[in-house]
Structure formats: C-alpha cells, structure tokens
Image: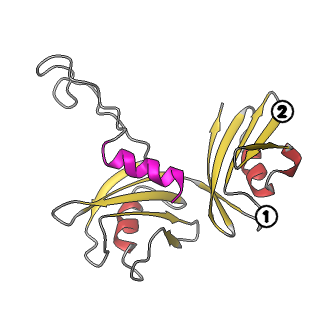
C-alpha cells in the first residue's frame, strides 16, 4: 500500500488529526469554545453506505476518467457508493481512504492528487524540487540527475511557476500518483 494511502488511513483513525489538547476542564475543546477542529490531510471527509463492500478499511484512487483503482480485491462496483459520496465535493483525480464503523457506515476521506504516466523502468517513489531554477530529483531515495527524472513528473513540476516540489508514488505499471506544492 502506498505511504500516502497509509497516512490517510492513520489520520482517519485519529492518529494525526492534530486536535488541540484539553488545557483545562471545558477549555480549548473544538466546538465548545470557538477553537477550530483539527483538520486531517484530506480535502473531503464524508460518510456513505456501501453494503456490498467487504472488510473494515480500504484505500483507492480515482483517475481523471473516473476509473477506480482499489488497493484490495473487492466485488465490481462495490466501491462506487464511496466514490459517489466523495464526488459530491471533489472530482477526480483523488486518493481516498475509508474505514467501516461498527454500524456498517463507511467514513471516507480523500485528497486531490495529480497523475502522470509512468514508464516500466521508473522507480516506486519520486521526489522532485525546483528552487531558484535548479531542479533536483530522487527516485527510491537515491539522488539522480534531474534530466533523467520521469518525464511525466517533470511536466507536473513544470505546471507551477517559481519554486515548487512534488512527491509521487507508483500506482501501477503505467501511472504515478503525485502531490505538488508551490514553495
């Protein structure tokens, strides 16, 4: 499972939601005193019923054409209710994680991603950065010449003016899933 998907699952389970600590009885509690509730690493958080979907947790990626790439063996169409709920607020492409509650309802979170074509010789992970016009690149934690970086990822980095960075993980043999930030 991709590290970005594991991070979504961990946050969805409450491991990294960054809710402010209780400083005194009844003080600094989100929803009670005006303190904002901590936001996880997602753009959308919602619930959905998916009775045909087995298991207790799941991650998937929605590609720009609407294809769902699921990180588990599930019945065809069983993930669609989760995607439909997310797509009320966030269109593809996105990466999602879902956890089933004891009542059977799924809580599903997603964040927008970028996708790029991957070549057969590409690595599993990539990091590219451009600072003051100088591009650096790492594939599978090894620094490489930026001119040999995967062309699809270079094109994504070039989609932002000025200083920028991106991280990417291979989704499958033909696709990178990436996040990009202006610096």
The quarter of the picture where the C terminus appears is top right
Main SS, magenta region, reads helix
Residue 7 lies in the magenta stretch: yes
> Which of the 4 image quadrants contains residue 102?
bottom left
* Crowding at mark 1 (Cα within 10 Å: few <14, some 14-19, many 20+): few
Per the image, label 2 sits on a secondary structure element best described as strand
Q: Which residues are the magenta region?
A: 1-14
At 52% from the left edge and 62% from the top edge, which residue is drawn? 92
Name the side, left or right, on which 30 lies relative to 70.
left
> Which of the 4 image quadrants contains residue 118?
bottom right
Image location (x, y in percent) of residue 93: 55, 60
Choose mark 2 or mark 1, whichever is in front. Answer: 1
Is residue 28 placed above or below 10 in the rendered structure? above
> Which of the 4 image quadrants contains residue 124?
bottom right
State the residue in front, 93 or 121. Answer: 121
Image location (x, y in percent) of residue 58: 39, 64
At 69% from the left edge and 69% from the top edge, which residue is drawn? 174
Is residue 135 placed above or below 23 in the rendered structure? below
Image location (x, y in percent) of residue 79: 38, 72
* Disc number placed over residue 134 in the picture, else none: 2
Per the image, label 1 sits on a secondary structure element best described as loop
The answer to whether the residue labelled 2 contacts the one labelled 1, judged by CB atoms less than 8 Å apart, is: no
In 3D space, how far apart are the residues under numbered discs 2 and 1 (Cα atoms)? 24 Å
Work out which residue is located at the far bottom of the displayed protein and give it.
76
State the residue in front, 20 or 65. Answer: 20
Which residue in the protein does label 1 denote?
121
* Crowding at mark 2 (Cα within 10 Å: few <14, some 14-19, many 20+): few
At 75% from the left edge and 44% from the top edge, which residue is drawn? 142
Q: Earlier in the sequence, mark 2 or mark 1?
A: 1
State the colouring used for the structure image: secondary structure
Name the side, left or right, on which 147 lies relative to 10.
right
């Amino acid at each position: 499972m991709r590290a970005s998907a594991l991070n979504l699952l961990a946050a969805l389970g409450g491991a990294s939601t960054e809710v402010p600590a209780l400083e005194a009885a009844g003080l600094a509690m989100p929803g009670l005193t005006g303190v904002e509730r901590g936001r996880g690493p997602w753009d959308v958080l919602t619930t959905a019923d998916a009775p045909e979907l087995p298991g207790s947790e799941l991650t998937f990626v929605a590609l720009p054409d609407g294809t769902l790439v699921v990180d588990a063996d599930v019945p065809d169409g069983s993930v669609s209710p989760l995607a439909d709920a997310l797509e009320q607020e966030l269109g593809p492409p996105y990466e999602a994680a879902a956890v089933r509650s004891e009542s059977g309802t799924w809580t599903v979170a997603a964040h927008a991603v970028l996708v790029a074509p991957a070549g057969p010789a590409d690595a599993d992970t990539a990091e590219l950065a451009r600072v003051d016009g100088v591009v650096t690149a790492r594939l599978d934690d090894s620094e490489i010449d930026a001119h040999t970086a995967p062309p699809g990822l270079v094109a994504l980095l070039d989609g932002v003016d000025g200083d920028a960075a991106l991280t990417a993980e291979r989704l499958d043999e033909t696709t990178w899933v990436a996040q990009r930030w202006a610096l």
